Image (cartoon, rainbow, N blue to C red):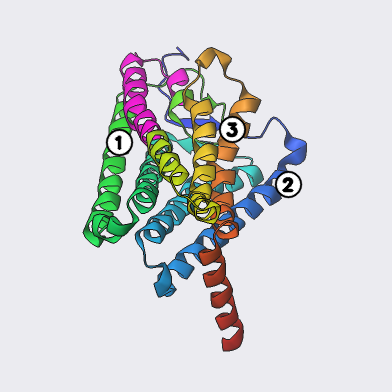
Amino acid sequence: MVNETKVLEFLLLGFSDIPEHQTLLFVLFLSLYLITILGNSLIILVIAFNRCLHTPMYFFLGNLSLVDTCLSSVTIPRLLRDLLSEQKTISLPACIVQVYFFFFVGIMEVFLLAVMAFDRYVAISDPLRYSLVMSQKLCLGLVAGSWVVAALHSTMHSLLLLRLSFCGSITIQHFLCDIPPLLKLSCSDTSLNESVMFSEATLLVMGSFLFIVLSYFRIISAILKIRSAQGRSKAFSTCSSHLTVVVFFYGTGMFTYFRPSSSSSLDYDRAVSTVYSSVTPMINPFIYSLRNDEVKGALSKLLRSCQLSH
């Protein structure tokens, strides 16, 4: 009879298996979250208030900072609450809502990284026509289209979860609601969910990744044709920040979603998900600010103006 009882709420295991470190983990994740919000907010403000940065590249970067802020906000506040609370339950509707927004901002970041790769390809391979090709209309269309497709993507997965029944165990071996651990708890046939997740993720995620790889092959080819070493160095420096972010994001994402479930481990899953949802959004502003002279200059100018106003 217990196994036939439908589950209406779940218990997020999180980091409860190491109770002696709950306070330390709370301080750590709170620090990560505050740094993420501050860093990405500064990037958005610098781009918004500096007319020199009103270019397609920084328009996409501003959207990336917004997405990173949302990605952290979907996961960390709930985790902070659970670290301080004895009650670590989450209702089924709230769990599916978290899945929706987690996938929404996740796939949005996938699209933005692909769009940014296209932007760098046009800037380096055809600089004379860059402003003509990357028009304001095209940039707005690419970003708006990405938001729409990401919303449809998340809606589809959320609706597929709603058709499932959950019974028996209520413990999610994770600190957030995600599709793979939820499918393990379902007593319904999950073959449709798994097939859609794999095929659609392969199409969107791997398709975007291959597009980025092909773009960089063309970018590298164009850079090698530049005669001066200084010109090659300058051209590559405009791509290095984006390439670093791509490696971090796709590396952790592929480890999480593109490996056999038999090889899953609670410690590894938690570590990778922490990097994917908490650490990567935090380091992106540092990657772009420390490796980009224009952002560093604009940030210094903004900070100086703030000091003079006081």
- Picture coordinates of residue 275, whole percent (x, y): 59, 39
Rate crowding at label 1 as few (under 14), some (14 to 19) or many (20 or more) other CA atoms within 10 Å: many
Q: Earlier in the sequence, mark 2 or mark 3?
A: 2
Crowd around label 2: few <14 · some 14–19 · many ≥20 (10 Å): few
Q: Which residue is mark 2?
A: 23
Residue 202 percent coordinates (x, y): 36, 25
Q: Amino acid at mark 2?
A: Thr
Tags 2 and 1 in contact by the CB under 8 Å rule? no
SS label for mark 2: helix
**Residue drawn where x is 47% and y is 26% of the image:** 257
Residue 282, compared with residue 186, is above or below; it is below
Q: Earlier in the sequence, mark 2 or mark 1?
A: 2
Percent x, y for residue 253? 49, 32
Residue most toward the right?
20
Q: Which mark is residue 14?
A: none
> What residue is rendered at 48% in x and 49% in y?
239
Q: For the residue carrying disc 3, how many other residues have a C-alpha within 10 Å: few (<14), some (14-19), or many (20+)?
A: some
Question: Residue under circle 3?
Answer: 272
Mark 3 belongs to which amino acid?
A: Val
Q: CA distance from mark 1 to mark 3?
A: 23 Å
Q: Secondary structure at mark 1?
A: helix
The residue segment tinted magenta is 182-211
Q: Which residue is under mark 1?
A: 153
Identify the main secondary structure in magenta.
helix
